[in-house]
Image (tube, rainbow, N blue to C red):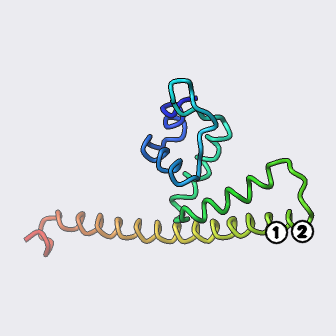
Amino acid sequence: MQIGEVAARTELSLRTIRHYEETGLVVPSARSQGGFRLYTERDVDRLMVIRRMKPLGFTLDEMRELLAATDRLDSGDELRASDREELLERVRGFEQAAQRRVEDLRTQLERAEDFAATLRDRLGGASEPGSATAR
């Protein structure tokens, strides 16, 4: 599929997809005779991993590291048991980091909701006749 379809499916901009290509995170699987980037389902899956990591604050280097580990695990190549375990341990580390970051985001969301409720309450009280803030 071409980049426009990939952008629609991943909800990423063309510019973002091109940036990820420039940084080596995702490389189109092929190019058409006209030079258009062509992507596979695997490329789309990769972009979705990146898209999910971004709001959790993972850096491009961290994304690259996780993708390299999962690429090796998924390659079908014969891995020594120790190499396989090392790769799985890296992925576990990312899973644990993701869980911590999700919890941090939940805490931030609770605080933001509390703040919005405080403002809503304040505005509700300000419009009542005779209130100190309405004078």
In the image: residue 28, left or right of residue 55: right
Bin the neighbour count of mark 2 within 10 Å (Cα to Cα): few under 14, some 14-19, many 20 and up: few
The residue indicated by pointer 1 is 86
At label 2, the amino acid type is Ser
Image spot of residue 111 (x, y percent): 43, 71
Image spot of residue 85 (x, y percent): 85, 66
Name above or below for residue 22 compared with residue 119: above
Image spot of residue 26 (x, y percent): 59, 47
Which circle marks residue 82 in the picture? 2
Marks 1/2 in contact by CB < 8 Å: the verdict is yes
Say which of 19 and 58 sits in front.
Answer: 19
At label 1, the amino acid type is Glu
Which circle marks residue 109 in the picture? none
Q: Residue at x 59, y 44 (%)?
A: 27
Bin the neighbour count of mark 1 within 10 Å (Cα to Cα): few under 14, some 14-19, many 20 and up: few
Among the 4 quarters of the image, the one containing residue 84: bottom right
Say which of 77 and 126 sits in front.
Answer: 77
